[in-house]
Amino acid sequence: MNKKTIWITGGSTGIGRALAIKFASKGWNVAVSARRVELLNELSNTYENIYAFPLDVTNKLKCKEVFNEIKNKFENIDICFFSTGTWNPKKEKDIDVEQIEDVFKINFFGTVNSIKAVEEYFRNKKNGIITIVSSIAGYRGLPNSTGYGPSKSALNNLAESLYFDFKRYNVRVCLVSPGFIKTPMTDKNDFKMPFLKTPEYAADQIYNGLINKNLFEIHFPKALTITLKLLSFLPSKVYFGLIGRMTKYQKK
Ligand SMILES: NC(=O)c1ccc[n+]([C@@H]2O[C@H](COP(=O)([O-])OP(=O)(O)OC[C@H]3O[C@@H](n4cnc5c(N)ncnc54)[C@H](OP(=O)(O)O)[C@@H]3O)[C@@H](O)[C@H]2O)c1
């Protein structure tokens, strides 16, 4: 097969699903992974060049097995897009240790397991892109985010660290920081989400960033991400005051 190939985890819904359809529409082979087999099969039955590879990313051995299956099928993998994530707003207000562990198991360690599965392949191949999906919630601390924000901050740091390591092998590590995108994940939110965008908008931004640009971070929508980036440079006292007011965070 001469077509280019992308492996997308978190491909059953939301941003990953929209990106799978975007790449498929551009003629790429798309290997999609997630736990819900029926959703993956629905995608692969609808789009000729989307192929289902069910996977729970918390299982590190399975991550390797599934990547081997993908390699055997397509031989050449050009981009990996690691987009699995979980967010439960109802549990983020407390220091619920089990919940925080669960969030880290998927958001952080699930991504680490996925990267580990492809590490040797990309080091030998000496080109390609490994993409880590983080969030604006990883820029700095936000109220009511005891698990999700810290897991995304950890991913930001990991992505920068891996950027150096993989650059030696001519492999690009790319960080994706979406603002609010309407997906099953954000459908749980009961607050107003500024600059809310569709998964198709996110997929266009990501496709363009991966294929037509050579940036480390792909972030969107800019009106939100640039504002948050500027806020993140402020001294803590000013940052806490402004974010507290913007999120109407109440003292107990
Ligand atoms: N939507 C936003 O506003 C927003 C903003 C910033 C960042 N993000 C990030 O973007 C990524 C995608 O989120 P989304 O909004 O598209 O949410 P979503 O629709 O809920 O997608 C999450 C995906 O992760 C998969 N997943 C969860 N746990 C998994 C596991 N253990 N193993 C394999 N797959 C697993 C889910 O599939 P199964 O349940 O079928 O396994 C699903 O495909 C996440 O990393 C999220 O943190 C989203």
Image (cartoon, grey):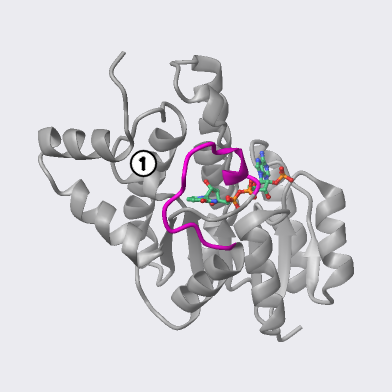
The amino acid type, in three-letter code, at marker 1 is: Ser
The answer to which image quadrant residue 186 occupies is top right
Residue placed under numbered mark 1 in the picture: 153
Mark 1: few/some/many CA within 10 Å (<14, 14-19, 20+): many
With 119 as the anchor, is 47 left or right in this view? Answer: right
| Foreground pick, 37 / 178 | 178
The answer to which image quadrant residue 224 occupies is bottom left
With 92 as the anchor, is 199 left or right in this view? Answer: right
Residue 194 drawn in magenta? yes
- The answer to whether one can see residue 76 in this image is no
| Residue 53, above or below 93 | below
Q: Residue at x 58, y 73 (%)?
A: 78
| Foreground pick, 25 / 241 | 241
Q: How many marks?
A: 1
| Foreground pick, 133 / 143 | 143
- The answer to whether one can see residue 169 in this image is yes
Residue 50 drawn in magenta? no
| Residue 141, above or below 46 | above
With 39 as the anchor, is 19 left or right in this view? Answer: left
Q: Quadrant of the C terminus?
A: top left
Q: Main secondary structure of the magenta part?
A: loop
Q: Residue at x 86, y 70 (%)?
A: 46
Magenta range: 184-198
Q: Residue at x 74, y 52 (%)?
A: 66
Q: Residue 199: where, in percent of width, then height?
A: 60, 62
Q: Residue 90: where, in percent of width, then height?
A: 55, 25
Q: Residue at x 53, y 37 (%)?
A: 109
Q: Residue 43: where, in percent of width, then height?
A: 81, 63
Q: Callout 1: helix, strand or loop?
A: helix
Q: Residue 138: where, in percent of width, then height?
A: 36, 44
